[in-house]
Image (cartoon, rainbow, N blue to C red):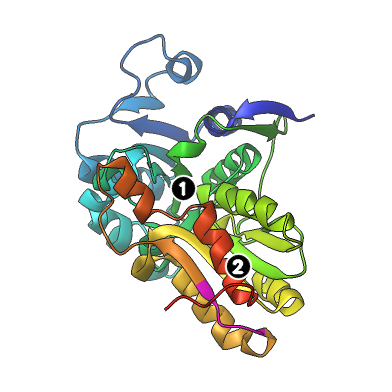
Amino acid sequence: MPRELPYIVAINEAIHLEMARDEDVLYFGQNMATTENEDFVKAFGKDRVRVTPISETAEIGLAVGAALAGKRPVVELYMAEFMLVAMDQVTNEGNRFRAMSGGQVTVPLVLKAGYGFAAGWAGQHTGVLTNLFMGVPGLKVAVPSTAADAKGLMATAIRDDNPVVYLHHYLLTLEHGDVPEGEHLVPFGEAAIRRSGGDVTIVATGWMVDRSLAAADTLAGEGIKAEIIDPRTVAPLDTKTILESVERTGRLVLVDQAPRHAAAATVIAGEVAEHGFSSLKAPIVQVTGRDATVPYSEPLEAYVIPDEERIAGAVRRVLGTSPVAA
């Protein structure tokens, strides 16, 4: 039976359920387990819920070692940018051991991190690194946009035998949605169609799904029916669902908060250009963040990050109902 829960509560519920189901699941990070009164500590004790030193290299390295020894650690990293401190462990160690050992070992760990905090917090708290991690062999990347998916993708991530980068958007933290009770798993590599429509396909991830849905409401008032696809995981990426939608609509707009030249949208555009070119009735349009560090100034931040107006404008352009931008 679904209940309405905040996105962040749904994530915590998934971790709690998986820790109760499997005693090998561990949970640790830099600002947790500081008292005996925290819920996870009370439920599972300090042997499984631990505070770590202020060192991402140490905590992710510890997670890789624990995973190799048979545990399933979940590392609370708070901000995605902090993973950059420990890139050797993320992109050169944990992700490679399974292949380098010929499958003799697995590395089941989850790197949980928030991203994209667009509220005047500037570059080191607002970055969108999805594309960086989706291009790393051996890593899986989950990007939930709803509370139900936040729970289901986290449970799937914990049960996966490979390292998973789980990216939750800060501006969705308190957003509510229906969340199934008990066990709930969302498979990796299966996109969700958030809204059906026959005029144009919009592919968006994370918070950009909400903005695309808002733009679609505006466009519906103009008689334009947009189909919105949320990949939910970008590695693996469900190109099949995207290509089928483009085959129906003939037009594609990609919406991504990341900078234009470091966006998952660029990869999706390449896949559609190679495998779905004959379906296209107009050039693909990407609505992305600007190629700039996100500034502290909120008016400038709003200029850098895609909004409903830019998304709606892009849809009008691919439909030929407004002039093509220079």
Asked if disc 1 and disc 2 are in contact, CB closer than 8 Å, the reply is no
User: In screen coordinates, is 111 left or right of 268?
Assistant: left
User: In screen coordinates, is 312 left or right of 180?
Assistant: left
| Residue at the farthest bottom position | 278
Magenta stretch mostly in which secondary structure?
Answer: loop
Task: Give the residue displayed 50% in from the left and 59% down from the top.
Answer: 310
The answer to whether any part of residue 62 appears in the image is: no
> How far across and down, in percent of the image, does residue 194 sit?
70, 53
Task: Give the residue displayed 26% in from the left and 30% down from the top.
Answer: 52
Question: Relative to the observer, which residue lies in front, 303 or 305?
Answer: 303
Relative to 106, does residue 7 appear above or below in the rendering? Answer: above
Give SS at disc 2.
helix
Depth-wise, is mark 1 or mark 2 nearer the camera? 2
**Which residue is labeled 1 in the image?**
166
Give SS at disc 1.
strand
Question: Relative to the observer, which residue lies in front, 181 or 257?
Answer: 257
Q: Which residues are magenta?
A: 280-285
User: In screen coordinates, is 248 left or right of 140?
Assistant: right
Which quarter of the picture shows residue 201? Answer: bottom right
Amino acid of disc 2: Val
Q: Is residue 281 magenta?
A: yes
The answer to whether any part of residue 253 appears in the image is: yes
Quadrant the N terminus occupies: top right
**Which residue is labeled 2 in the image?**
315
Binning the other alpha carbons within 10 Å of mark 2 as few (below 14), some (14 to 19) or many (20 upward) gives many
Q: How many marks?
A: 2
Disc on res. 300: none
> How far across and down, in percent of the image, does residue 248 sit?
76, 76
Relative to 286, does residue 173 appear above or below in the rendering? Answer: above
> How far across and down, in percent of the image, does residue 278 sit?
66, 90
